[in-house]
Amino acid sequence: MKAFKLEELEAERAANDGAYLQFLRERNMSAGLYALDAGSSDPQAPHGQDEIYLVVSGRASITVGVETTQVARGSVVYVPAGVAHKFHHITEDLRVMVIFSPPEG
């Protein structure tokens, strides 16, 4: 079993000065914590894997392909592999759990 505490993952991510911390990598999936501060822009490009976002905290909009929705704590968004997507209009610091399948390259 592998178990994680969100506050410890956030501290590790911040200590490494990165927006993304991959904390789990297995044969069929990987998981990470993604952080975007209020007012920032999301530099993502489409990924080669399916992914699921679980918003842990914050508020923003996300556009996946041509669809846009608002997200906040508890929102879950599925993004198919290869589809353009970005968080935007980030009004509160955003912390998002990301699951990739298969694992991110």
Image (cartoon, rainbow, N blue to C red):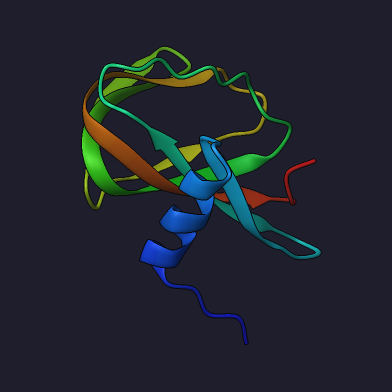
Relative to 97, 69 lies left or right: left
User: Seen from this angle, which residue lies furthest bottom?
Assistant: 1
> What residue is rendered at 37% in x and 63% in y?
7
Location of the N terminus (image quadrant): bottom right
The answer, for residue 33, to whether it is visible in the render is no
Question: Does residue 36 lie above or below 32 as drawn?
Answer: above
Q: Residue at x 53, y 80 (%)?
A: 3
Residue closest to the eye, 80 or 17: 17
User: Looking at the picture, does residue 29 appear above or below residue 37?
Assistant: below
Q: Is residue 8 left or right of residue 82?
A: left
Q: Residue at x 42, y 72 (%)?
A: 5
Q: Residue at x 22, y 39 (%)?
A: 58
Where does residue 38 sit, x and y in percent of width and height?
A: 25, 25
Q: Is residue 94 visible?
A: yes
Above or below — where is 51 with respect to 5? above
- Examine the image and state in which quarter residue 36 appears: top left
Give the x, y percent position of residue 92. Answer: 19, 31
Q: Is residue 98 left or right of residue 28?
A: left
Along the line of sight, which residue is nearer the eye, 27 or 68?
Answer: 27
